[in-house]
Image (cartoon, rainbow, N blue to C red):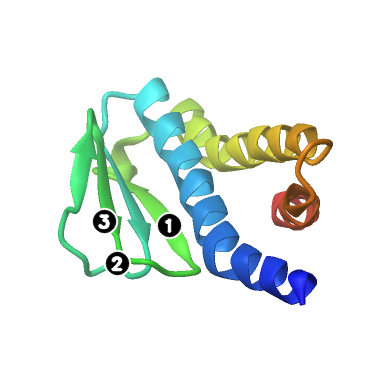
């Protein structure tokens, strides 16, 4: 019974949080490498701003998919685009390393670590 509950918790909470953190990584790549604003979407692209943190605008509705767009993506240089593209996997790797550390102490984090490995790949 506990394993089913753990799986459901991972599926309903872990996947959206991982997706959101991955997209925040892309947004950090944009704002660190350029002067652009970034829009982070979770759930659907047609959502209004939920809130803002600095130059990152969040559009959140609970969902299993997400994406990030720079305010004016066509004006990014090659180096800035590389920062934007690399930000997501770097954040996913950081989450993976943190989850694998916590997996030593929390059984639920073992499943999350496995999911994070698949998400990173």
| In front: label 2 or label 3 | 3
Position above or below: 70 against 45: above
Q: In this figure, what is the number of numbered marks?
A: 3
**Marker disc for residue 80:** none
Say whether marks 2 and 3 touch (CB < 8 Å): yes
| In front: label 3 or label 1 | 3
- Quadrant of the rendered image containing residue 67: bottom left
Could you classify mark 2 by the number of other residues whose Cα lies within 10 Å: few (under 14), some (14-19), or many (20 or more)?
A: some
Q: Residue furthest front?
A: 1
Residue 70 relative to residue 103: left or right: left
Position above or below: 105 against 63: above
Circle 1 is placed at which residue position?
A: 67
User: Residue at left 64%, top 38%?
Assistant: 95
Position above or below: 91 against 20: above
Q: Residue furthest left?
A: 48
Of the image marks 2 and 3, the number of the one nearer the N terminus: 2
Quadrant (top left/top right/bottom left/bottom right) for the N terminus: bottom right
Distance in Å between CA atoms under marks 2 and 3: 8 Å
User: Residue at left 22%, top 69%?
Assistant: 46
Circle 2 is placed at which residue position?
A: 45
Position above or below: 117 against 92: below
Nearer the observer, 63 or 34: 63
User: Residue at left 61%, top 66%?
Assistant: 9
SS at mark 1 in the image:
strand
**Marker disc for residue 59:** 3
SS at mark 2 in the image:
loop
Say whether marks 2 and 1 touch (CB < 8 Å): yes
């Amino acid at each position: 019974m506990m394993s089913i509950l753990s799986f459901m918790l991972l599926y309903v909470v872990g996947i959206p949080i991982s997706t959101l953190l991955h997209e925040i990584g892309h947004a950090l790549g944009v704002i660190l490498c350029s002067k652009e604003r970034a829009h982070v979407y979770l759930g659907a692209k047609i959502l209004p701003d939920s809130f803002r943190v600095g130059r990152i605008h969040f559009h959140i509705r609970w969902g299993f998919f997400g994406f990030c767009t720079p305010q004016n993506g066509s004006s990014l240089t090659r180096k800035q685009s590389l920062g934007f593209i690399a930000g997501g996997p770097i954040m996913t790797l950081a989450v993976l390393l943190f989850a694998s550390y916590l997996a030593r102490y929390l059984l639920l984090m073992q499943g999350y670590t496995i999911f994070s490995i698949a998400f990173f790949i």
